[in-house]
Image (cartoon, rainbow, N blue to C red):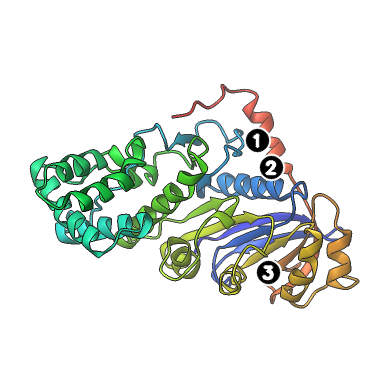
């Protein structure tokens, strides 16, 4: 695990509060909760800035083009997933010894992804499993694109109803550039000589497509990590509006929450409410090593109060939550004490700082605006 210290702000006693990302922590996950205008975005941005200052790679999934454009000079870039050729959702990975992923394994993995997300049935799945290897051989390619798959599908002598049902579901993905790129992408993103911050912008997709593409991107990243476990990649995956994703067993988010530490992956998740999550999904989120509860919605106070462990707040947790102002939060986790030791897990009120954000904004005024790739 990385050895990074994040300054959150100050306590009610004006003592600096530091959160260490170290071996003592259960994982590198951070969850930020609070209603609109409570300070979630500023907290997220401050943590990102401090990670970048420490040369920690950050990848952000941006649903609504809300990512701010103040990264240090030459450290960040934004990739429009609808139009860019920088991301391949059907990437074929290379194993640790640089061998190409076995063809049968690759085809099964892509079929599973398509069937899971497009809800194909067994007969449809059997047809796609036939189409993928035929596409690889027909086009003499290492990996498939959606264009190859649809072209090969149209030429198969199969039941027209099955062919049409597959074609119709794949058609909505046809104009998404990421499904028609036949080159490696994650190796380039994780290259040590490339950008520290990569924003994957989903804002140009229709809402019905946005979650599907996000899940596919995360599924693809999950596959890349599992094939590249030789060294820890040491990065933070940032997702605002994280309630949009699926947290059930065997989903990408379940993988990152439960196994992310093994691959050097930490999550930075932000959402307005916990009520949108099922009980088992909340349990996974609450295993995060740091929880920042900003001003909650009125109907969330009782739920959050039950979830916060022992506290150093002067009054009860419910009263503290209701009195929070913008930029104030109840932080729960293991912190550094005055002699630099990691404490047991507890909760306290923190007045959040945005010092590093302001420094980055000042720096950004002295450089051109980042273009959308």
Among the 4 quarters of the image, the one containing residue 278: bottom right
Helix, strand or loop at label 1? It is helix
Q: Nearer the viewer, mark 3 or mark 2?
A: 3
Mark 2–mark 1 contact, CB under 8 Å? yes
Q: Earlier in the sequence, mark 3 or mark 2?
A: 3
Q: What residue appears at the point 8 percent right and 46 percent down from the top-left corner?
A: 137
Q: Which residue is mark 2?
A: 356
Q: Nearer the viewer, residue 145 or 70?
A: 145
- Residue that badge 1 annotates: 360
Check disc 2 and report its element: helix, strand or loop.
Answer: helix
Q: Residue at x 65, y 49 (%)?
A: 44
Q: Residue at x 28, y 38 (%)?
A: 181
Task: Name the quadrant containing residue 194.
Answer: top left
Q: Measured from the top left, where is residue 304 in percent x and y?
A: 74, 69
Is residue 40 left or right of 184 when viewed as pictured?
right
Figure check: 138 above or below 8: above
């Amino acid at each position: 695990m990385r050895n990074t210290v994040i300054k959150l702000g100050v306590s009610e006693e004006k003592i600096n509060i530091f959160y260490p990302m170290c071996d003592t922590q259960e994982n590198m996950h951070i969850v930020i909760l609070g209603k609109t205008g409570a300070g979630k975005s500023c907290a997220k941005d401050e943590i990102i800035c401090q990670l970048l200052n420490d040369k920690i790679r950050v990848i952000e999934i941006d649903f609504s083009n809300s990512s701010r454009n103040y990264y240090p000079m030459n450290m960040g870039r934004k990739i429009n997933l609808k139009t860019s050729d920088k991301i391949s959702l059907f990437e074929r990975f290379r194993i640790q010894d640089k061998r190409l992923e076995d063809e049968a394994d690759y085809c099964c993995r892509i079929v599973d992804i398509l069937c899971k997300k497009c809800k194909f049935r067994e007969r449809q799945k059997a047809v796609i499993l036939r189409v993928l290897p035929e596409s690889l051989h027909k086009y003499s390619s290492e990996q498939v694109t959606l264009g190859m798959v649809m072209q090969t599908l149209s030429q198969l002598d199969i039941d027209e109803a099955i062919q049409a049902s597959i074609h119709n579901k794949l058609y909505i993905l046809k104009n998404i550039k990421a499904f028609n790129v036949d080159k490696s992408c994650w190796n380039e993103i994780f290259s040590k000589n490339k950008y520290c911050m990569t924003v994957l912008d989903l804002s140009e997709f229709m809402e019905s497509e946005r979650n599907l593409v996000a899940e596919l991107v995360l599924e693809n990243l999950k596959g890349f990590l599992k094939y590249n476990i030789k060294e820890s990649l040491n990065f933070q995956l940032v997702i605002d509006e994280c309630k949009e994703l699926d947290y059930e067993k065997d989903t990408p988010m379940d993988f990152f929450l439960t196994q992310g530490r093994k691959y050097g992956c930490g999550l930075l998740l932000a959402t307005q409410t916990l009520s949108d999550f099922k009980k088992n999904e909340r349990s996974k989120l609450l295993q995060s090593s740091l929880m920042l509860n900003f001003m909650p919605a009125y109907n969330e106070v009782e739920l959050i109060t039950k979830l916060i462990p022992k506290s150093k707040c002067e009054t009860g947790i419910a009263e503290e939550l209701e009195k929070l102002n913008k930029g104030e939060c109840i932080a729960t986790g293991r912190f550094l004490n005055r002699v630099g030791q990691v404490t047991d897990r507890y909760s306290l009120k923190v007045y959040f700082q945005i010092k590093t954000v302001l420094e980055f904004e000042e720096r950004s005024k002295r450089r051109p605006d980042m273009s959308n790739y």
